[in-house]
Image: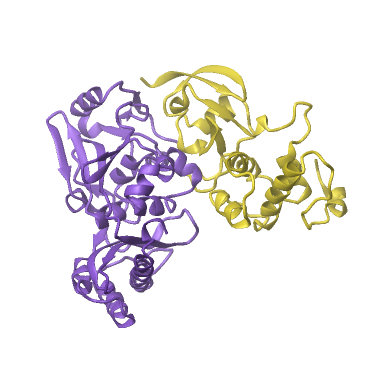
Chain colours: A yellow, B purple
Amino acid sequence: MNKRIVALTINGVDVQRKVASRMLLTDFIRDELKLTGTNVGCEHGVCGACTILLNGESVRSCLMLAVQADGYEIETVESLQNDNGTLNTLQQSFKDCHGLQCGFCTPGFLMTVTSFLKENEDPTEEEIREAISGNLCRCTGYANIVKSVQRTVQSQRTSKSLTEPVCHTDHKQNETVQIS
Amino acid sequence: MKPAVFNYIRPESVEETLQLLSDYGDDAKILSGGQSLIPVLNMRLSTPKYLIDIGRLEGLNYIREEGDHLSVGALVKHKDIESSPLVKELCPILGEAIRWVGTTQIRNRGTIGGSIAHGDPSAELPCVLAALRGEIVVASLEGEDVLSPEEFFLTYMLTSMQPDQVIKEIRFPIMSKKSAFSFVEVARTHGDFALAEAAVILETDETETVIKAQIAVGGVNPTPTVLEEVEDHIMGKKLTDELLTEVRRMTEGNVDPESDLHGTAEYRRELVGVLVQRALKTAGERVKKGAGRHE
């Protein structure tokens, strides 16, 4: 009873592992599956850094045991990129609008917002702020994260047309200091 | 912070769950959504030998209208209450309060049974349940018990549930179509534990005189607290500013909060008085408009 087989689908791939019952889903994703995009922050459900999608809904992977996810479909930040490996609209918006600085919280924000925008395609600023209230960021002060989400909404609305970014940050000026 | 070793069991039925609880008693802990229990396990504040995962049990996941109340199965998730047309129609204060429970991520996993069983005095659902005079159905191999919130919640994080019992159902009385309600809370950030909260259900006659009042507060006493004295005091009266000021004072006298990092006892006492005053005022305005139930 201390070990159990966990079989689930992660980012479209079926996986199966025999793990300790006490293993948290975050550790299963990071240590067993080597998908280290999902970050471990507070481990008691406060910071949101470990947010993943469970059957399409955002949940905290530190507040689940791996065995509880048996049979479910999981998506992590690794699933977001476009097929050709470029950043998707949401990721690109975070980059363009400086919705991140150190980047630790970013995977959690991206997953939270991914599921949020599926349910609300045209959110108000207040709705965006409420949606991200379960994710902590200690760098940005949230303003640029909200802008990133708004930018994503606008990009999706004007679908693929190359309009000027709505975020007010002059991203070109900062491009030279970006590490990635 | 990782949970200590335990034996994980996933029973297939309620009967099997009750048998396991009867066999293991104090050594076992029930896991459903895990949004309160897993943090406790992670911090090793609890180290059960057996973890009984009822999260997938069928038969405890329903919202039904039954006579004068709404029956909610213990495994119903917060998000399902939030989006339930039945809740909105028959017990709208529940829908309003549930939005204060944690964050979206928590509400996607957390269950109503888990929230009630946790017995956190600052939690929203126990406060609403107390205000409405709802009931909690607990089961063991011996049979079922139907408990009032007063009988169920004993003190901070402690309920009257025995080690061989599990929550099956929560019963929320159906609200009168003529009543209005308000649920207000102050927390450090949205989704954080309430520093104080108040739930009010109110009914007035055509002269705007109070003919029914149900008021409960949370976060300020060891258990959710019904303010009977306040309820009695406003019956048969109009909600004037003077009366609301009296209500505030009376509320302050009925609570005994503790100080912690996030707020002193004095602050919480004053805050909860203001919240009750505010909730009553809002409910009063809503009932006047005759549109209180759906805002």
On the image, the x and y values in percent for residue B76 come to 36, 37
Would residue B131 appear left or right of B6 to someone viewing this image?
Answer: left
**Front residue of this view, candidates B32 and A33:** B32
On the image, the x and y values in percent for residue B12 come to 31, 20
On the image, the x and y values in percent for residue B290 come to 36, 63
Residue B262 against residue A68 in the figure, above or below: below
Residue A85 against residue B137 in the figure, above or below: above
Whether residue A134 is visible to the viewer of this picture, yes or no, is yes
Residue B152 against residue A55 in the figure, above or below: below
Would residue B152 appear left or right of A126 to someone viewing this image?
Answer: left
**Front residue of this view, candidates A176 and A55:** A55
Would residue B167 appear left or right of B45 to someone viewing this image?
Answer: left
Locate residue B36: give its quadrant.
top left
Whether residue B43 is visible to the viewer of this picture, yes or no, is no
Q: Which residue lies at the image location 46% right of the left edge and 43% below the top edge?
A: B106
**Front residue of this view, candidates A178 and A163:** A163
